[in-house]
Image (spheres, rainbow, N blue to C red):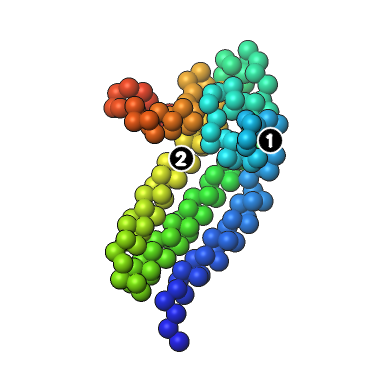
Amino acid sequence: MNNPFRIVGFLGLIVIAMSIVLGTVFPSKAPWMMDGFFTPIIAFEFVQSKDEVKRLFGIAISPEQQSGTQSIAPPMIKAMDSGNRLYYIHMLFYASFLFFFSLTCARITGQKLYYAASIIAVVILFGDGFENIQLLSITSNINRPVFYAIGPIFQQFCKGTLQAGQSRPFVWL
């Protein structure tokens, strides 16, 4: 029996299993979240400032912490970092799932539009990878004076105003 979606189905099962595992690794509650957010990981992706990150993780903002002399790593930061590292594996599987699903649909239907969807799956993989680098960078640099949050950078990029030389969107550059 020839099943063209065999690989896709296998990848889909792995994506489901990884999603369940990630649900147990990422923190499910936070001391504070912006209005409208229900999970800490999504709230973390949209923080606007260093103070919001510290509030999200339950870190009191004191002069000692602001000077960067005290190293803090509460359990929530460790859980968030563990989840973000594990998420790299999940990314590979869900991008592969989308990629092979699109290619299989293109092969079966003959519609070339599905090839565009397979390219988008690869773009999503790289975008998600860069996002995770930024999230891990934020938690590792939470006590440093220079700090970049994803939210304002993402908004600026979406508005088309992020141009070369205007800002440093990534801490590691």
Residue 23, given in percent of the width and then of the height, sits at 64, 51
Q: Are marks 2 and 1 in contact (CB under 8 Å)?
A: no
What amino acid is at disc 2?
Glu
Residue at the top extreme? 63
Residue at the bottom extreme? 1
The answer to whether residue 158 is seen in the rendering is: yes
Residue at the image point whose x is 53% and y is 46% from the top: 85
Task: Say what secondary structure mark 2 lies in.
Answer: helix
Label drawn at residue 131: 2
Q: Which class describes the residues within 10 Å of circle 1: few (<14), some (14-19), or many (20+)?
A: some
97 up-or-down from 172: above or below: below
Task: Say what secondary structure mark 1 lies in.
Answer: loop
Residue 116, given in percent of the width and then of the height, sits at 32, 57
93 up-or-down from 158: above or below: below
Say whether residue 109 is left or right of residue 76. Answer: left
Residue at the image point whose x is 38% and y is 30% from the top: 159
The answer to whether residue 172 is seen in the rendering is: no
147 up-or-down from 9: above or below: above
Which residue lies under the disc numbered 1?
30
Residue at the image point whose x is 56% and y is 19% from the top: 68
Q: Which class describes the residues within 10 Å of circle 2: few (<14), some (14-19), or many (20+)?
A: some
What amino acid is at disc 1?
Ala
Q: Nearer the viewer, residue 117 or 148?
A: 117
Q: Quadrant of residue 54?
A: top right
Q: Quadrant of residue 4?
A: bottom left
Query: Looking at the rendering, in which quadrant would you find the C terminus?
Result: top left
Say whether residue 20 is left or right of residue 147. Answer: right
- What is the total number of numbered labels drawn onto the structure image? 2
Query: Looking at the rendering, in which quadrant would you find the N terminus?
Result: bottom left
Mark toward the start of the polypeptide (2 vs 1) = 1
